[in-house]
Image (cartoon, grey):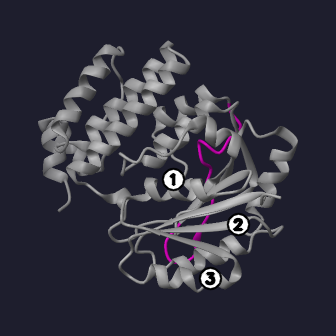
Amino acid sequence: MSPAVSILIPAHNAAPWIDATLESALAQSPPGGEIIVVDDGSTDGTLDRARTFGARGVTILTQPNRGAAAARNAALRAARGDWFQFLDADDLLAPEKLARQLARAGAEGPDFAYAARWSRFYASPADATFPPQRLCVDADPVPWVVEKFAHNAMMHPAAWLISRTLAERAGPWDEALSLDDDGEYFTRVVLASRGVRTCQDALSYYRSNLPGSLSSAKSERAWASAWRSLELSAARLQAAEDSPRTQHACATAFQRFIFESYPRAAGCRRTAAGRVSQLGGSTLQPEGGRKFHFARRLFGWRLARRLTAGP
């Protein structure tokens, strides 16, 4: 008999946190399923730490450093479960997270994507406060993605539980992406589903502000990945429904990319500006603090961004 849930953990240089992550995976109630760690060429002892959990049934795979998407695909290929839980090697699951999602999935079936409430934490999960999240709702696929684009909302990977059926329909992770590979993947999953079903009593924890984290990367390669992720997601949204609401949501997302990436990613920004124009424009205004908005009134948003940017 196949395990109910495969918990799939890509790991790269996560030695300080992976013990807590694996303990949270092993603590799932009811017990069962499988846990697969794919070490993605770590150099800090992550692999040694993960191997100490082998006697407790955790499967450890290794590969040269190829990125989180490739590690997740390797875990998917090895997985035997009917349901998949992606879990980054520094994040945590509440003990009843999977049981509560599986209970709803048992009533509604494998064609929905099941979400949990989630919160950021810094030093300890006890710090998590679980404020309202725009995407932690029950919604049909297109309105959910429109909301994501319009408000730059996010869900971290550990919040989701998806069936093997839905994962196979959506396809593998895009290994060409680095920054926002998860945004592209789960947008694709949602659009391949019958909709999102959020289990308000299921919880996950997103560790934030880690030094050197990929989500804080500002390199040209990272911005190019973010742009490609957005392009792919927007194309799939418009393929699902080409309407004024999806056009406006895509234009807003493209305009936000222009604001956030400036002055980097010049070629991507030019392409984004063309797409904004083609889609009818966006009313989105650049965000910033008081100094930014004061400088913006005097000099325009571009110079204001340069003048108020951090080091």
Residue under pointer 1 = 73
Q: Dot 2: what SS?
A: strand
Residue drawn at (54%, 32%), measured in percent from left and top?
Answer: 145
Q: How crowded is mark 2: few (under 14 residues within 10 Å), some or many (20 or more)?
A: many
**Is there a contact, CB below 8 Å, between mark 3 and mark 1?**
no
Residue extending furthest right? 107
In the picture, measured across the screen, residue 96 lies left or right of residue 60, that is: right
Residue under pointer 3 = 53
Q: Nearer the viewer, residue 62 or 236?
A: 62
Question: Does residue 136 lie above or below 147 as drawn?
Answer: below
Magenta stretch?
Answer: 121-139
Upstream in sequence: badge 3 or badge 1? 3
Q: Which of 169 and 208 is in front in this view?
A: 169
Q: Which of 212 and 181 is in front in this view?
A: 181
Question: Does residue 282 lie above or below 108 as drawn?
Answer: above
Amino acid, disc 2: Glu
- Mark 3–mark 2 Cα distance, whole angstroms, equals 12 Å
Question: Does residue 40 lie above or below 229 as drawn?
Answer: below
Q: Dot 3: what SS?
A: loop
- Mark 1–mark 2 Cα distance, whole angstroms, equals 16 Å
Expressed as whole percent of the image width and height from the top left, the position of residue 287 reads 33, 42
Amino acid, disc 1: Asn
